[in-house]
Amino acid sequence: MNILQINYNDIIGGRFNGRGLNEYFRCLGHDAQQCVWVKDGNDQYTWRLSQKLNLLIRALCNIFVCLTEKVLSIQSLLYPWPILLFYDKRFHRSDIVHYHLLHNGYFSLLAMPKLTSLKPSIWTIHDPWLMTGHCVYPYSCKRWKDGCGECPDLKTFMPMRFDNTRYMFESKKNILEKSRVDIVVASRFMLEMAQKSPIFAKHRIHYIPFGVDTGIFKRMDSTSLRTKYNIGQNNLVISFRETDYEYKGLTYIKEVLHRLSLDDYAAPITLMTVNQRGLLKEFKDKYQIIELGIVTDEAVMAEFYNCSDIFLMPSTAEAFGMMAIEAMACGKPVVAFEGTSLPDVVYSPAGGICVPMKDSDALYAAIDRLLKDQAECKAIGNEAYRLSRIHYNFEDHAKKMLDLYEDVIARHYEQAPA
């Protein structure tokens, strides 16, 4: 089978945006390639959309389109780059095209009806943006169910200058109605949203959870790892994603870190983070802080989790939660908020503890409890490990995708116009 993945970036999010799938598919003998807007890696099977254009010209053109869309308060409608796929032999050689993140400022949705008529197509929806008038996460707003308009918050990501949400909603709906594409979601949270969305009313929706490589994300010798990262063997290690993205929950983590009293615990506390650096300066005199920054090496991520006692993920919005299942696969309990995909993903309370949304007191109580009760902490971690092997094995995820590819290909040509 000739498989083409289309995504914004080849490295960031590679564990779930097609790169990992392609590596596995090639091991099975398939011809699997990836087309991206930003190519950071050196994979010979990954190519950059508009790779024949001068990078400066490409950048200037994209800046102009981006500014135009901001002025008009529209999103992902004017970018010309998908046109290049119509003239690319690699696109035309493909048996199936699997789309991922398309709203990162490089792809026009207007191309989807034509592209999906030419090739059997799947679109993995990584967040709810396609179901709304502008925002990536609607939070408690329910206007996405009946067409948006009169938006209560135009500033939330992705922002608009003026309220054009009704137009964007109707544009997405019209485009999807003309597109022959199967929709894939990774969580029951997203499945329920997609089933209620007028935009997907005429589409097949498939629930296929992401998976992790359990040969990499596994239990490891924490003694040697803590020595490697200069962490005391008896230290209590709290790990989390250090980022200032509005919905990733760092504000609530900080509130808890201010409240924790080191005198209440049997050992010092270490904070270990990935992603950004420098956002925890206010705690440098209270905790040992180890910031790994952006990590793209899965082996290093596995070490990160295995150094930890608990993993915090108090996102106020989350469509799946890849880091949660990675932590589970390493035998670590996850602490998160309710009201997102995470309670179902971690099988709370079995594989993690979920507390009411934005409740700092409840979040503090859960973290305090696990730090003081190592027996409970380990018991939840053991169950998380077991559940990860049942529900989040990467090979199972890939095989389900292959089965879906075959089904979509068969239906595409059965239903092709005479």
Image: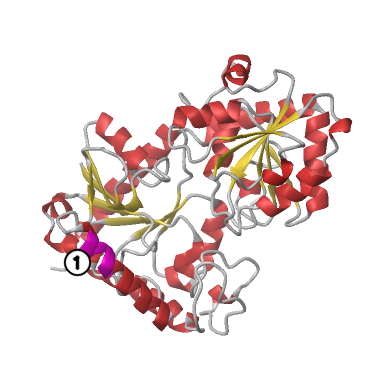
Above or below residue 103? Residue 350 is above
- Which residues, given as a range, are shown in magenta? 56-61
Residue with the mark numbered 1:
83
Comparing 73 with 29, the one in front is: 73
Which residue is located at x 56 percent, y 38 percent?
A: 325
Comparing 265 with 4, the one in front is: 265
Asked whether residue 221 is drawn in magenta, I would say: no
Principal SS element in the magenta part? helix
Label 1 crowd (10 A; few <14 / some 14-19 / many >=20) = some
Asked whether residue 57 is drawn in magenta, I would say: yes
Above or below residue 322? Residue 229 is above
Secondary structure of residue under mark 1: helix
Q: Quadrant of the N terminus?
A: top left
Q: Name the spot of residue 312 as percent of width and height, x first.
A: 67, 41
Residue 51 in which image quadrant:
bottom left
Q: Quadrant of the C terminus?
A: bottom left
Q: Name the spot of residue 235 as percent of width and height, x first.
A: 73, 24
Is 353 placed left or right of 27 in the picture? right
Which residue is located at x 52 percent, y 57 percent?
A: 191
Residue 3 in which image quadrant:
top left
Whether residue 386 appears in this view of the structure is: no
Which residue is located at x 51 percent, y 72 percent?
A: 159
Q: Name the spot of residue 60 as percent of width and height, x first.
A: 27, 67
Amino acid tagged 1: Ile
